[in-house]
Every structure is written in C-alpha cells, then in structure tokens.
C-alpha cells in the first residue's frame, strides 16, 4: 500500500512505530421500537438496572485508574458518576418514554444526544468536554441495555497503535500500558481526556486527524509523530528509516535528561536558580521530585471545588495542604488561593454564567466577596504552614487595593488561629501573581506589599495581546515572544528586584527551553513548570553561561519582531543544547 500522510494536532510528544489497532470506532445505534403502555414500567426497570450496572463499572474503572495512574486521573470519572446520577437527566429519559412509548435504548440515546449537543455548543473548553463524558456514559449504558460486551484492549498480546474516532477516558486508561504504544484519533484537542492521559502514559499521540479511523486498515504499519502532529500510514523504506533514527535519538536524549535529576539548576559559571514544579494534587508531589524539582512553585487548589456536590471544609483542605507541605519538606510549597472562574468549572457554588468569564468574577475578585470561603481556605493554609515551608499567593491581582484587602483578611485569619491556640508560620511569605497588564505595569507599587511575585504568563499574554488562547482561529497571535510581553516581564522582574523581592514564573513560558534562556538572562529567580518539563529546563540552564543568557535578553528587548527573537533564541539553543532542538521537534 502507498505511503499516506495524515496531519492533526500533536497531543503527546515523541515518535512511535507500530501496527494499527482499529478500536470501536463505530457508534452504537439503538433500534427504534414502539411499545405498549404496559411495557413502560418494565423498560424503566431495565433502564434503572443498566444505570446501576454502569455505575458499578465506572467505580471499578476508577479504582483501576487510581492504582495505575494515581488519584488525580481517577477524578476524571467523578464527572461520569455525576452524569449517571443526574436526576434531571434521568427524569427526562423517564418522562420521554412515558410520553412517546418507544423502547428504552432508543429513548435514552435520543435524550443523551440532546444533552451532548447542548454541551458541545458551549464556548468553553472545560464544559465542552462534558459532552465527551455524556458520550462515554451513554455508550456504556447502551451496551448494558443491549447485553453487549466492549472490546477488551486490556489483554493485548502485542504492541499496537490505537486508531479510533475518539477515545473515552475509560478506554484510554484501561489499555494495556505496555502494549499500547501510541494513539491516533479522528477528533480531539490538546485539552481532551485522550491527550491528557496519553501524556501521562508518555505515549506519543496525535488527535484531530479527521477520518484516519476510516482510512487506515487494521494491522497496517503506522508512524505517529506526536511532536509534529503527523501520522504516516504504510511508510516507505526511506521514511521508516528516518523515523526509526529519530525515535532512537529521542530515547537517548530523554535518558540523558533524566540523569540530571539530582544536579542543581545552575549555569556553567555557577549561577543557581530555583527549578520548581506546578501541581494540582497532593499525589503529584512524588512525581515532581522524581523529576528533580527544588520545590513546589505552584500548587493549584481549584480541584477541591470541581466535579463535586459539596463545598470542601477547612479540615479537608488543611489535610491536603499539610500533605503537600510534609511531602515537600524541607523544600518550599507555594499555595495559590482559589482561582475559580474563567475556564474553571464550578459545581455546588451557584456562580452565574458570564459573557466574558475570563474578565469576570473570578479568582481574587470572587474570594474578596465570598470571604466565608476565602477565610476557610486561608486558615487551612496557615495551619499547614506550621513547619515553615509554606508560602501563600493571591491570583488575578489587578491593583494594590485588592492586595491590601487580601492581606487584611489573611491577618484576620492569623488572629483567629492565634486566639484558638493553633500553630502556624507567623512569618509566612505572601506573594502576588502577576497575570494582568495592570499588575505588570504597577509592579513597582505592588512589590512593596508582598514578599515575592510569580508571573502567570498564560493569562498575561492573553490579556496583553487581547487574544483568546483557546480560539483556534487566532491562536497564531498568542505569542510569548511578542516585544510587548518580553518588555512587561522584564519590567516586573526589575521592579521586584528593586524592592528586594524575588520573582518567579509559573506559566507555560517558563517551560519552553528557548524562552527559558531569555528569562534566565532577565534575572528570573524561580522557574516553576510541569514535572515533565523539569529535565529540559534543567538541561538548558546547566548548558549556558549566565553572560550569554544576559546578552540574549538584552538583545531581544531591542527587537521589533517576533521572528527576530525566535531566530536568535534558536541560534543560542542550537549552540548550547542542540539535542533540545531535536526533542522539541525543530529538526
């Protein structure tokens, strides 16, 4: 068969070569059948039985995923449980069958499609993913109603590349990790469950390939280039030889990077910076330190409020914060206070939908009004700080008034704990996230009110360039090398140092090797990145002279175009760490 090339979205980096396994890509179709009024109760009973069995299946999957991948990924299935227990959804199905008198398989599928359609049209990536949850649960319930068994990919005997229209979280998580070496799907995005879990499994993956599941045959040889977002079917000998070489080279590079784990993030001339990790759950701490983290530079706390029905109490939060602090000790942990809103889903909290949620009632703005929730969290953080390695940070600060009010509430909480005889770190460091243009431009003022800054580049870039970072049509405008962004960041670092406070960065920009060179040259004190990026950033820091990084930073601040900066960074990267250019796909 002739070589064919499919282009999609590189969702998990790396190269895999193997045989295609076409997985369950056809949708289950429920046959429409009229029923008598007397049959309605029987159909409803079958439906309830299928829901019970499906719920049991999901709980079993959740346990298995928790064992294999950790509790963080198992929480994905909380959303599935919520779908299957949703009373309005269930009652909608029952009312429809009572009214229309069709068989339960057909009615259930029609109602599910209606809900799926509603969620898929919401312009919010997180809520859009709920359509995927409904689709996954619907297939499971239909299989149970029809007495059908799904393909068991947990018992594969040879290595395969899974090719599918889409993969549900349960499909992906239960696959035999040693036998499934890669994924290629018709649909999906970087934020889809398939992409997230593929990265966790360190399996190369390409999503958004449109129709690959219908054009590739089972057993056909595939090359999946997860870095370049390309899948090649039936490759020629020359292509196969080229990618086999690339795959071998990538593996050697990755092994070398891991060997740096216990070495400091220090330049060739001995200038040392802190290289920390961003985490979401206490269970993420071991992986962060296994990659060589110096500490936790960003502990997001929103997960407490997501995909659950109740609001977490002070004790539950305290236990989680204490767990992270104790696991990290003597290294430090920066706990970011609640950053709900924008793209973060709210469950029990009745927060109305807004026209512009990223610019709306979120993060510190929300906390300063819901002081009941804010104080509960601050007390929990303060109590977890008793051993002295916890810092607290306020997100979405846009002015000094917010910062003063937040610090005032923190002081109130400290006073309450003092009266109650509770221990806490009385010298706890307090920081502000710099992620709005307003905060960056007034960094000199804010610096006098905090102990540190952490620059959140994801939002800073979005707000400064007026670019919705999840809008595919204008994604090309989201550019960290833009002169405006580089100047803002330099201004924040300079203002912080002038007031003798340290400045870190916890955005995606700090995890990009070529940009890390600029940031190092600008004087950034702490890089906080995802755990998987730590080896790459440590490598680049350990490969350069500080003077060269400073020269780079000085030069790019004079450039007027993005391309000048890109080319200059690549030249230095090729000079000091060419293997990272290969690893990042610029071969």
Image (cartoon, grey):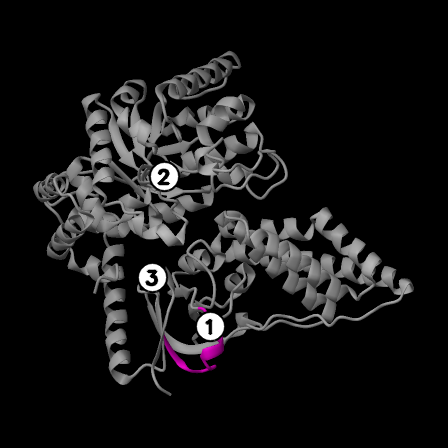
Which residue does the image show at 85% across and 68% down from the upper left?
35
Q: Earlier in the sequence, mark 3 or mark 1?
A: 3
Question: Which span of residues is magenta-colored?
Answer: 210-223
Which residue does the image show at 47% across and 37% down from the upper left?
356
Residue 215 within the magenta-colored segment of the rendering: yes
Task: Farthest residue to the bottom: give it.
Answer: 1
The quarter of the picture where residue 7 lies is bottom left
Determine which of the numbered discs, if any, sits on residue 459 in the image.
Answer: 2
Q: Position of residue 251 (x, y in %)?
A: 27, 65
Q: Position of residue 322 (x, y in %)?
A: 46, 33
Which residue does the image show at 53% across and 52% down from the upper left?
128
Q: Secondary structure at mark 1?
A: loop
Residues under labels 3 and 2: Cα distance? 24 Å
**Pointer 3 with pointer 1, Cβ within 8 A:** no
Q: Position of residue 199 (x, y in %)?
A: 40, 58
Determine which of the numbered discs, if any, sits on residue 211 in the image.
Answer: 1
Residues under labels 3 and 1: Cα distance? 21 Å
Left or right: 252, with 546 as reference point: right
Residues under labels 1 and 2: Cα distance? 34 Å
Q: In the image, is residue 360 above or below residue 306? A: above
Number of residues whose C-alpha sits closer than 10 Å to that of mark 1, classed few (under 14), some (14–19) or many (20 or more): some
Residue holding disc 3? 13
């Amino acid at each position: 068969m002739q070589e064919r090339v499919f282009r999609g979205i590189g969702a998990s980096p790396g190269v895999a070569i193997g045989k295609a396994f076409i997985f369950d890509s056809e949708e289950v179709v429920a046959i429409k059948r009229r029923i008598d009024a007397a049959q309605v109760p029987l159909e409803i009973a079958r439906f309830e039985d299928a829901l019970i069995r499906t719920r049991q299946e999901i709980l079993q999957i959740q346990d298995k995923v928790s064992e294999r991948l950790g509790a963080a990924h198992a929480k994905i299935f909380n959303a599935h449980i919520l779908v299957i227990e949703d009373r309005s959804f269930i009652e909608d199905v029952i009312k429809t069958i009572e009214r229309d008198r069709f068989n339960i398989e057909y009615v259930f599928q029609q109602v599910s499609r209606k809900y799926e359609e509603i969620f898929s049209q919401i312009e919010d990536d997180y809520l859009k993913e709920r359509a995927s949850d409904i689709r996954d649960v619907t297939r499971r319930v239909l299989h149970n109603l029809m007495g059908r068994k799904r393909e068991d990919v947990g018992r594969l005997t040879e290595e395969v590349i899974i090719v599918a229209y889409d993969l549900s979280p349960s499909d992906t998580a239960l696959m035999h990790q040693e036998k499934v070496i890669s994924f290629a799907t018709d649909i999906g995005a970087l934020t889809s469950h398939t992409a997230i879990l593929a990265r966790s499994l360190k399996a190369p993956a390409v999503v958004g390939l449109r129709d690959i599941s219908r054009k590739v045959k089972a057993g056909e040889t595939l090359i999946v280039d997860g870095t370049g977002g390309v899948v090649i079917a039936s490759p020629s000998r020359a292509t196969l030889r080229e990618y086999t070489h690339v795959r071998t080279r990538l593996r050697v590079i990755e092994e070398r990077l891991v060997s740096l784990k216990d070495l400091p993030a220090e330049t060739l001339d001995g200038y040392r910076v802190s290289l920390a990790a961003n985490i979401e759950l206490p269970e993420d701490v071991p992986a962060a330190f296994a990659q060589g983290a110096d500490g936790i530079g960003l502990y997001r706390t929103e997960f407490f409020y997501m995909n659950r029905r109740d609001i977490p109490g002070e004790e539950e939060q305290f236990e989680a914060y204490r767990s992270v602090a104790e696991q990290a000790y003597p290294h430090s942990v920066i706990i970011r206070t609640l950053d709900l809103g924008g793209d973060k889903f709210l469950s029990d909290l009745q927060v109305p939908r807004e026209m512009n949620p990223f610019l709306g009632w979120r993060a510190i703005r929300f906390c300063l009004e819901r002081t009941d929730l804010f104080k509960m969290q601050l007390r929990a953080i303060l109590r977890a700080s008793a051993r002295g390695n916890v810092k607290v940070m306020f997100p979405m600060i846009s002015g000094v008034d917010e910062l003063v009010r937040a610090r005032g509430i923190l002081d109130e909480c400290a006073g309450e704990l003092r009266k109650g005889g509770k221990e806490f770190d009385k010298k706890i460091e307090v920081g502000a996230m710099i992620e709005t243009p307003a905060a960056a431009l007034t960094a000199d003022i804010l610096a006098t009110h905090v102990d540190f800054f952490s620059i959140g580049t994801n939002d800073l870039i979005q707000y400064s360039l007026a670019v919705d970072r999840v809008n595919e049509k204008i994604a090309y405008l989201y550019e960290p090398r833009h002169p405006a962004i580089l100047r803002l960041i330099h201004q924040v670092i300079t203002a912080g140092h002038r007031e003798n406070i340290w400045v870190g960065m916890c955005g995606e920009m700090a995890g990009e090797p070529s940009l890390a060179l600029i940031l190092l040259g600008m004087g950034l004190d702490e890089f906080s990145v995802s755990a998987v990026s730590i080896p790459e950033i440590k490598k680049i820091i350990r490969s350069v002279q500080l003077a060269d990084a400073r020269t780079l930073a000085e030069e790019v601040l004079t450039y007027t175009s993005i391309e000048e900066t890109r080319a200059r960074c690549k030249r230095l990267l090729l000079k000091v760490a060419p293997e990272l250019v290969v690893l990042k796909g610029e071969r």
